[in-house]
Image (cartoon, grey):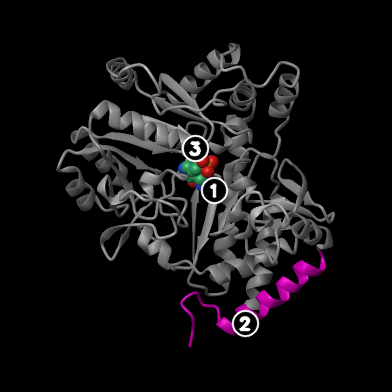
C-alpha cells in the first residue's frame, strides 16, 4: 500500500541502512572524538540534543567559513543549515570577524556600556522602525524578558501562543493543543508548575479561536512568529495578520513578534515588510553574526509604561537581564553585523538563490509525482511531506515523517550537503552560490530516485 509520503517503507529502511554504513566508514576521526567525549560529556556531546541529528554519531566540525565548513575527517560541506539561523549571514562574516579580533585587545565584559551600545541602538531603530531597545544573550532570554515586561505593564497574567510554536526554552510557551485541549508538552523536563494556567494556545490562521481567546481581556501578550517555522513551515493566509493584529490591539493585548527565524524575510523582518506594527520585536540568533546575543525593541508608549512599572516596584532584582548580556564582544559583533553584513545587497542575493532553490525543489518533486509541497519565507525554504501547504501547527505536525527526514538528511550529508535537522529547512547566505543550490537539488533528486526504485 502506498505510504502517505509517497515513499515505501522498505526502500526507506534500505536506504537508511546504506547511508548509515557510509557515514560510519568515512568518519573515523569523528567517531574517535565521539568515543572520547563520552567520558565526560553527558551523551558525549556538550548539549544533549546534539545526538538528535540523524547521524550514527555526531559529526565533529573543524572549521566553518561563509557557506561551508569541514569536519575533522577532512570532508567539506555546503551548509544550508547555517547553525539553524545563527549563521544566516554566513559563518564568521569578515566584518564581524574583524570587529571581534579588534575587541580581543579591548576587553569582553565590564557590565558597563561603551560607544558600540549607542551605535547599535541607532542601527536597530533605523532598521526596524522601533525607537527603544534592550538586549539579551539568546532569543530564549529575549522572549522570557518580553513576557515579563508584558505582564508587568498590562497587569495581566496570560500569554497566548500558537499550537506547534517554538520560541526557545521559555517554559510558558510549552503548551500544545491535544485533541483541542491545552496540554503541557510531555517532553518538557523538570517542570513542576501547571503551565496551562497562564498560557492560552490556539491554532494559527484561525481568527475565530483567536477572537474568542481574547474576549476575557486577561491576555498580556500574543507571542508569535509571523510565519511559523519550527513545526515545518506554516505561512499566514492572506489577510490573516491584518485581522489578527486588529483583534489583538482591540483587546488591549500586546503583540510580540518573534523574528528570530523570519528575519529571512528582509532587512527589516516580516513585520516591517508586511506592516504588522508589533509592540515588541524580538530577534536572536543571527543578529550578532553568530556571536551570542539577542535584541528586543518596543514602541515609545511601551517604553513609558515599562519605566512606570519599574518605578512602581521596590528596588531589587527585576528578573530581567543576565550578567554577560550586552557585553562588549556582543555589542561590537552586532554593530559590525547590522552595519556591514545584513545589507540590502546581501538579502537580494539570498532571495535570488532561495527562489532558485524553491523552484528547483518544486520541479524535482513534481517530476516524481510526490505529494509534497515547498514553502518559502525570503531566504528560508522548506519542503514538507504533504500536498498542500499546512494551515496550522496540527496539519504541519501530521505531515512530518522523521525516518524519511533522517534518511534524506543523511544521504545529503554523505555527499557534502547539510540541511537543518528535525524538519526540512534550508537557508541560503550571502556566500552561497547558484552552483551550491543546484548541487543540493540534484543530490536530493538522486536520493528520491533511489527511494522510488
Ligand atoms: N524563537 C524562535 C522563533 C526560534 O526558532 C528559536 C530557536 N529555534 C528561538 C526563539 C530560541 O533561540 P535560542 O535557542 O537561540 O534561544
Question: Of the residues under marks 2 and 1, which one precedes in the sequence?
Answer: 2
Residue placed furthest toward the top: 115
- Residue wearing tag 3: 139
User: Do the residues bearing badges 3 and 2 touch, measured as CB atoms within 8 Å?
Assistant: no
Above or below — where is 53 with respect to 235? Answer: below
The image shows residue 399 at horizontal and vertical percentages of: 44, 67
The kind of secondary structure element at disc 2 is helix
Front disc: 3 or 2: 3
Check mark 3 vs ligand 1: CB closer than 8 Å? yes or no.
Answer: yes
Above or below — where is 367 with respect to 362? Answer: below
Front disc: 1 or 3: 3
Does residue 292 appear to the left or right of 33 in the view shown? Answer: left
The image shows residue 272 at horizontal and vertical percentages of: 41, 32
Viewer-closest of 91 and 314? 314
Check mark 1 vs ligand 1: CB closer than 8 Å? yes or no.
Answer: no
What residue span does the magenta drawing correspond to? 1-26
Q: Main secondary structure of the magenta part?
A: helix
Amino acid at each position: 500500500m502506498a505510504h502517505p509520503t509517497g515513499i515505501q517503507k522498505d526502500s526507506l529502511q534500505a536506504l537508511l541502512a546504506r547511508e548509515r554504513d557510509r557515514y560510519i566508514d568515512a568518519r573515523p576521526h569523528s567517531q574517535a572524538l565521539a568515543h572520547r567525549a563520552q567520558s565526560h560529556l553527558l551523551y558525549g556531546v556538550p548539549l544533549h540534543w546534539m545526538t538528535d541529528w540523524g547521524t550514527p554519531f555526531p559529526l565533529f566540525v573543524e572549521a566553518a567559513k561563509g557557506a561551508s565548513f569541514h569536519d575533522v575527517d577532512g570532508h567539506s560541506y555546503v551548509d544550508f543549515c547555517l547553525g539553524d539561523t545563527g549563521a544566516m549571514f554566513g559563518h564568521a562574516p569578515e566584518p564581524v570577524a574583524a570587529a571581534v579580533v579588534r575587541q580581543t585587545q579591548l576587553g569582553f565584559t565590564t557590565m558597563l556600556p561603551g560607544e558600540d551600545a549607542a551605535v547599535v541602538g541607532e542601527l536597530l531603530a533605523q532598521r526596524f522602525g522601533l525607537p527603544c531597545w534592550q538586549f539579551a544573550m539568546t532569543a530564549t532570554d529575549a522572549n522570557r524578558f518580553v513576557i515579563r515586561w508584558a505582564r508587568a505593564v498590562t497587569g495581566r497574567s496570560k500569554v497566548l501562543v500558537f499550537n506547534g510554536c517554538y520560541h526557545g526554552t521559555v517554559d510558558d510557551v510549552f503548551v500544545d493543543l491535544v485533541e483541542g485541549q491545552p496540554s503541557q508538552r510531555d517532553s518538557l523536563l523538570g517542570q513542576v508548575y501547571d503551565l496551562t494556567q497562564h498560557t492560552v494556545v490556539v491554532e494559527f490562521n484561525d481568527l475565530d479561536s483567536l477572537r474568542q481567546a481574547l474576549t476575557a481581556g486577561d491576555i498580556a501578550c500574543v507571542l508569535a512568529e509571523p510565519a511559523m517555522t519550527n513545526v515545518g513551515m506554516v505561512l499566514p493566509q492572506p489577510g490573516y495578520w491584518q485581522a489578527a493584529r486588529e483583534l489583538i490591539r482591540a483587546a488591549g493585548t500586546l503583540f510580540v513578534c518573534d523574528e528570530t527565524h523570519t528575519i529571512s524575510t528582509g532587512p527589516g523582518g516580516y513585520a516591517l515588510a508586511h506592516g504588522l506594527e508589533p509592540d515588541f520585536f524580538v530577534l536572536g540568533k543571527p543578529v550578532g553574526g553568530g556571536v551570542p546575543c539577542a535584541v528586543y525593541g518596543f514602541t515609545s508608549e511601551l517604553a513609558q509604561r515599562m519605566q512606570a512599572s519599574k518605578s512602581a516596584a521596590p528596588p531589587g532584582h527585576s528578573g530581567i537581564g543576565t550578567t554577560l548580556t550586552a557585553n562588549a564582544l556582543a555589542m561590537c559583533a552586532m554593530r559590525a553585523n547590522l552595519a556591514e553584513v545584513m545589507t540590502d545587497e546581501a538579502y537580494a542575493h539570498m532571495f535570488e538563490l532561495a527562489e532558485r532553490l524553491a523552484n528547483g525543489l518544486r520541479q524535482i518533486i513534481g517530476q516524481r509525482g510526490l505529494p509534497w509541497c515547498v514553502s518559502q519565507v525570503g531566504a528560508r525554504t522548506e519542503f514538507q511531506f504533504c500536498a498542500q501547504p499546512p494551515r496550522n501547527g496540527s496539519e504541519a505536525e501530521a505531515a512530518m515523517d522523521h525516518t524519511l527526514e533522517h534518511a534524506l538528511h543523511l544521504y545529503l550529508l554523505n555527499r557534502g550537503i547539510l540541511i537543518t535537522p528535525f524538519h526540512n529547512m534550508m537557508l541560503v547566505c550571502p556566500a552561497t552560490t547558484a552552483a551550491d543550490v543546484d548541487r543540493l537539488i540534484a543530490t536530493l533528486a538522486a536520493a528520491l530516485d533511489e527511494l522510488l526504485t
